Amino acid sequence: MYIIEKLLRTPKRGMVVLLFFSIGAQLAFAQPGNGDVFGKKYIKKLIPKVVDWQLNNPRHDPKDWTNGAFYAGVFAAWETTKSKAIYQALLDTGNAQQWQPHKRWYHADDVAISQTYIDVYRKEKRPEMIQPTRDTLNLFVSRPYPDRGGVEVIKWWWCDALFMGPPALVKLGMATKDRQYLDASDTYFRETYDLLYNRDERLFARDLNFVIKADGSGRKEANGQRIFWSRGNGWVMGGLVRILQELPMDYPERPFYETLFKEMADRVARLQPQDGLWRASLLDPEAYPGGEVSGSGFFCYALAWGINNDLLDKQTYLPVVEKTWKALTACVSEEGRVGWVQPIGGSPQKNFGPDSWEVYGTGAFLLAASEVIKLKR
């Protein structure tokens, strides 16, 4: 076991099967009989179990974007539990990778892991932990994006990038007290906003392939609605949280991010299915059986953070978060595996179930846990 066994040693309990009947689909989840899923003791026992399972079942290069999301969750798990074993896992990963981002200096995916490097640096104060990130982001800011003549018309040309790139730039700017990184993040974020944000729907298209043209042509769901996928918008809302956590209160552009966060929160909350988990496609849920945990996890994280930081009305949003968290915990197996995660892809998908897991789904779950535990209910 990667994390100290004694952290996970709890009495064996029976299994309770929860059945959720949703829009045309039946979902079955197994959940340990655990009492109050909002209790601090329960969450602090669940977090290391989930971290431990994922560390013992690695997938992808540790510097990959998938693990960028996972390790963001691991750092949040450490902040919540103060587990020495979890913190050591963060140090071991960074040291093993020599604190390097992934391969491409120009791609937001490849600096997602840098968010965790910067967070650990702020505890350790070892310059080598952030110098490779600094070198990479300096190239990113100073050079044009090497597009291939496709949809890459701006640096962050897909909405998921708003979780990967902006928090890395903003965290680096705050850690080094260099405002150029904050301003660069703002410039590139707004380009993505202008290109992909639908002001009527208050949601982001994944990329230009999903933006309806002026003549009405373009890709749509089977029910005729525009395609806005759950995970992509979950990434955006998670990214907004991580930006707002860093930006100074007097930063001139902060109101833009707060307003966008509130707009999306309102829209997402209104689209929540009865069982608590959003489907892979936000506007055609009936065509996508099965709740999607990575998008739902990021939504839970963002909405809970909004309540905890007085950006969202507690009376309105707490029931949404409660419903989501109950459903999310029901998607965790007895050994700590987070299921019902949509596989990697650039559009909503249907073929996944309780045994479908991915490291970013675990990261989203851990981020959600780190905010749900703070809720005053």
Image (spheres, rainbow, N blue to C red):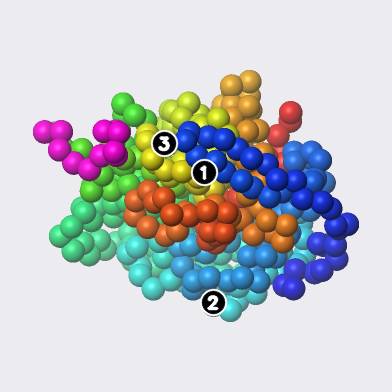
According to the picture, the residue beneath numbered tag 2 turns out to be 97
Q: Amino acid at mark 2?
A: Gln
According to the picture, the residue beneath numbered tag 1 turns out to be 291
From the top left corner, tell me how far across and down residue 62 is, in percent: 52, 71
Relative to residue 283, is residue 325 drawn left or right? right
Tag 2 secondary structure: loop
According to the picture, the residue beneath numbered tag 3 turns out to be 286
Tag 1 secondary structure: loop
From the top left corner, tell me how far across and down residue 74 is, in percent: 64, 59
Asked if residue 275 lies in the magenta stretch, the reply is: no
What quarter of the picture does the N terminus occupy? bottom right
Relative to residue 29, is residue 259 drawn left or right? left
Q: Amino acid at mark 3?
A: Glu
Asked if residue 217 lies in the magenta stretch, the reply is: yes
Within 10 angstroms of label 1, few (less than 14), some, or many (20 or more) residues? many
Q: Nearer the viewer, mark 2 or mark 3?
A: 3
From the top left corner, tell me how far across and down residue 300 is, in percent: 58, 39
Relative to residue 191, is residue 33 drawn left or right? right
CA distance for labels 2 and 1: 34 Å
